[in-house]
Amino acid sequence: ITLSVENHGNGTGKKFMFVYKDNGPGLPPGYDVSNSKSLGMRLIKDLSKQMGGTLTYSYKNGSCFAIEFYDKVARKQED
């Protein structure tokens, strides 16, 4: 699990990237993360929604879930 932080241009907040990786077999080909009804996927999707972030999934020698989100200052700038 990693969490990285970047400044979001001209002192208008910070961008965060929360990444979870494992070395397992990954999700089956054609698996639709956005329409999954499993408890684990619902928790991941709900977490990213609560943080105002976007969720992406990829396979890189295991599952890789990334949630990109911004702090309150940066989110206000976008509104």
Image: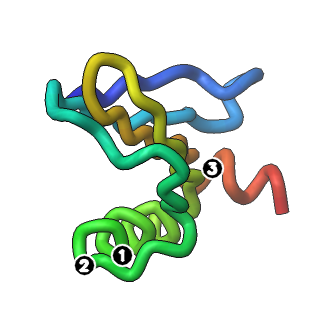
Q: Can residue 71 be seen in this snapshot?
A: no
Q: Quadrant of residue 36?
A: bottom left
Cα distance in 3D space between marks 1 and 3: 27 Å
Q: Quadrant of the N terminus?
A: top left
Name which residue lies at 66% across and 27% down. Answer: 8
From the viewer's perspective, tell me whether residue 23 is left or right of residue 12. left
* C-alpha separation, residue under disc 2 versus residue under disc 1: 5 Å
Quarter the C terminus occupies:
bottom right
Which mark, by number, is residue 73? 3
Callout in the foreground (1, 3): 1
The kind of secondary structure element at disc 1 is: helix
Residue at image mark 2: 39
Give the mark nearest the N terminus, 2 or 3. Answer: 2
Kind of residue sitting beneath label 2: Leu
Label 1 Cα crowd, 10 Å radius (few <14 / some 14-19 / many 20+): some
Q: Position of residue 69 (x, y in %)?
A: 54, 47
Q: Tell me where residue 11 sits by quadrant.
A: top right
Three-letter code for the amino acid on which mark 3 is drawn: Val
